[in-house]
Amino acid sequence: MDNVNTGFLSTMSVDGFVGTIYGMYTTSLGESSKNRASFNWFKIEIK
């Protein structure tokens, strides 16, 4: 990924918080879909 704007991670623009946020999502790549995804939990392991 080239030329990614990371300015929103600046402590000046977020009042000092630069933590990590995880978000689960799905996509139909712009196509109409009746499919669903449901996430009850997820686990992160750092090895």
Image (cartoon, helix red, strand yellow):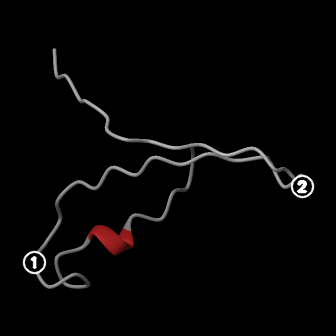
Q: Nearer the viewer, mark 2 or mark 1?
A: 2
Amino acid carrying label 2: it is Ser
Q: Residues within 10 Å of mark 2 (few under 14, many from 20)?
A: few
Q: Is residue 44 left or right of residue 38?
A: left
Q: Which sits earlier in the primary sequence, circle 2 or circle 1?
A: 1
Q: x, y percentage for residue 21?
A: 28, 56
Say which mark, if any, is on residue 32. Answer: 2
User: Label 2 to label 1, Cα distance in Å?
Assistant: 40 Å
Residue at position x 67%, y 46% in the image: 36
- From what the image shows, is residue 18 above or below residue 11? above
Q: Residue furthest right?
A: 32
x then y, percent, for residue 7: 37, 72
Please report the residue visible at 59 percent of the width from the left and 43 percent of the height from the top.
37
> In x, y percent, where is residue 1?
56, 43
Vertical placement of residue 15 versus 35, above or below: below
Q: Residue furthest top?
A: 47
Instruction: Work out which quarter of the rendered image holds the C terminus and state it.
Output: top left
Residue at 84%, 50% in the rendered image: 33
Could you say which quadrant of the image residue 13 lies in?
bottom left
Q: Position of residue 20 (x, y in %)?
A: 23, 54
Which of the pair 16/4 is nearer the observer? 16
Residue identified by numbered label 1 = 16
With 37 as the anchor, is 46 left or right in this view?
Answer: left
Instruction: Pick whichever, 6 or 23, lies toward us.
Output: 23
Task: Tell how many labels.
Answer: 2
The answer to whether mark 2 and mark 1 are in CB contact below 8 A is: no
User: Which structural element holds mark 1?
Assistant: loop
Disc 1 crowd, CA 10 A, few/some/many (<14, 14-19, 20+)? few
Q: Describe residue 36's horizontal placement relative to residue 42 as left or right.
A: right
43 and 38: which is toward the camera? 38
Secondary structure, mark 2, is: loop
